[in-house]
Amino acid sequence: MASTSELNKLVFNIGDRYNTFDPFIWAEKLNLDIYWENIGPKPLAKTNYMFNNPFIVMANSVKYSNQKYFVLAHEIGHVLEHKGLAAYYVSNNVHRRKTEREADAFAMAVITNLYVEENGKLPDTYADLRYNYGLPYLGE
Ligand SMILES: [Zn+2]
């Protein structure tokens, strides 16, 4: 179970390695293919596996919205934190809710750093982040 500071460290290390907190560039570097499909409204994205290789399906409805950054970062959180397969096949609801919260925390850290990258400062309020990236409800 990753703590918040471990999550932040992980996010910071990846941002440092790729020189950006843009999750679309991360996906490219991590060889994560993204397929835009008519899915949603819930979920807005899904991580799937083909022969142990993860790929991400995202909803067309967020393709031209800033919400796509949070949504993709959440999925990358699943791929990185849970090494994919094990978490994917877990059927236990309590565990699943926990992995969703962790993926949300991961995505929040990415989005916060992306805000700093683009604006040169921390967001003043959570509302700033919400406005800039159209954050979905946490925990789903
Ligand atoms: Zn999730």
Image: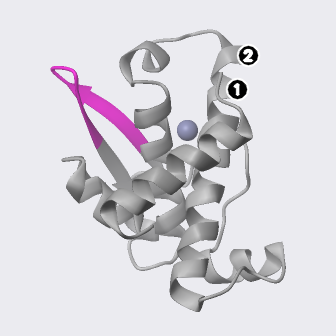
* On screen, residue 64 above or below 137: below
* On screen, residue 51 above or below 66: above
Can you give x and y, in whole percent of width and height, for residue 123 in the image?
A: 74, 81
Residue drawn at the location 53% of the way across and 73% of the way down:
114
Can you give x and y, in whole percent of width and height, for residue 33 in the image?
A: 20, 49
Which range of residues does the magenta coloring cover? 46-55
Q: Is label 2 in contact with label 1 (beta carbons under 8 Å)?
A: yes
Can you give x and y, in whole percent of width and height, for residue 3 in the image?
A: 71, 32
Task: Give the number of the mark in front: 2 or 1.
Answer: 1
Residue drawn at the location 56% of the way across and 10% of the way down:
91
Q: What type is the residue that disc 1 sits on?
A: Lys
Q: Which mark is residue 98?
A: 1
Label 1 environment density (alpha carbons within 10 Å; few <14, some 14–19, many ≥20): few
Residue drawn at the location 75% of the way across and 82% of the way down:
128
| Count of marks overlaid on the render | 2
Q: Is residue 129 something one can see in this rendering?
A: yes
